[in-house]
Image: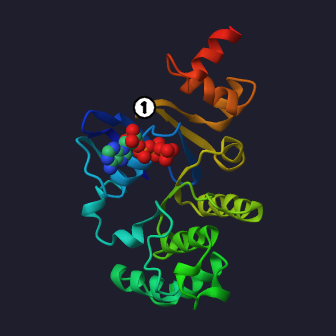
Amino acid sequence: MIEAQGLTKRYGPTVAVDALSFDVLPGAVTGFLGPNGSGKSTTMRMIMGLDRPDAGQARIHGLPYGELRWPAREVGALLEARTFHPGRTAAQHLTALAAAGGIARSRVDEVLDVVGLGHVAGRRAGTYSLGMAQRLGIAAALLGDPGVLLFDEPVNGLDPEGVRWIRELMKSLAAEGRTVLLSSHLISEMALTADHLVVIGQGRLLADTSVRELTARGASLEEAFFTLTAAPGTASAARKGVSR
Ligand SMILES: Nc1ncnc2c1ncn2[C@@H]1O[C@H](COP(=O)(O)OP(=O)(O)OP(=O)(O)O)[C@@H](O)[C@H]1O
């Protein structure tokens, strides 16, 4: 389980995340939706202990990331693709991560197979396409077999087969009882993948509800999303005004 309580992050005058509270429960895919710049990545970074909140707290299994005993075995995240050394092979990259995280070496081959990179594991990761790099990032997230997983835009750069693969992977991870938080800009994809949604705008919570409930508010999930995120003065809000 992930808990965010009053999470707040400022960058100078910008309030990136504003008193944000939500829980992410196990056994479901929770979609994390919001317009560009609404604070999704910053929130995920605070959950993973990479950014320090100015106020509030994020906890995983009841503890801040920094207090987890074996963090790599409790939580895995894909926050950015290409966080590997380009000169290392995928197998070398994952082996180094396994050693640092106290994870058995045998997991490296297992996760390479799960993400479909087994046949190119000996190639330098710097030569990978964006889609292959995303798969390597997912392999790294899965390496410690963690119960909590965060994925920031994992379908970026993936072809249709890859997008479908991600959808099925997310669902199967949730079906195994894991906690899965997934951000994406693709609302249609979210409608197919997520069970629950946390929607934010300008760093604030706009909705914390099931996909079914939010979809029922409008003609489609996309319409419901636009209605929810339409801030005064935006093009989207103007469109709404005209239609009313
Ligand atoms: N390191 C930083 N320094 C200054 N401002 C930042 C920094 N990181 C994020 N921000 C600002 O914080 C706000 C939230 O950004 P964030 O990347 O968390 O949003 P996001 O919802 O993930 O966006 P996107 O969907 O475009 O990836 C934005 O206004 C962004 O410009």
Number of numbered discs visible in the structure rendering:
1
Q: Is residue 93 left or right of residue 102?
A: right
In-front residue for pair 239/9: 239
Q: Which residue is mark 1?
A: 202
Q: Is residue 24 in view?
A: no
Residue 36 is left or right of residue 169, and the answer is left
- Mark 1 within 8 Å of ligand 1, using the beta carbon: no
- State which quadrant residue 221 falls in: top right
Of 209 and 153, the residue lying toward us: 153
The answer to which of 24 and 49 lies nearer the viewer is 49
Mark 1, other Cα within 10 Å: few <14 / some 14–19 / many ≥20: many
Query: Where in the image, quadrant-wise, is ligand 1 located?
Result: top left
- Amino acid type for the residue under numbered disc 1: Gln
Coloring applied to the structure: rainbow
Residue at image coords 57%, 91%: 122
Q: Is residue 75 above or below residue 17?
A: below
The correct choice, above or below, for 194 with respect to 19 in the image is: below
Q: In the displayed structure, does residue 58 sit left or right of residue 232?
A: left
x, y percent for residue 174: 60, 58
What residue is shown at x 69% (from left), y 27% (from top)? Answer: 223
Q: Quadrant of the C terminus?
A: top right
- The image position of residue 158, as x and y in percent, is 67, 63
- Where does the image place residue 91, in percent across and percent down from the top left? 52, 88
Residue at 64%, 61% (x, y): give it.
157
Say which residue appears at 58% left-offset and 88% top-offset: 123
Q: Regarding mark 1 in the picture, which secondary structure is present there? A: loop
Residue 22, position in %: x, y? Answer: 42, 39
> Which of the two residues, 242 or 27, is positioned nearer the viewer here?
242
Residue 129 sits above or below residue 48 on the image: below
Pick out the residue farthest to the top.
Answer: 244
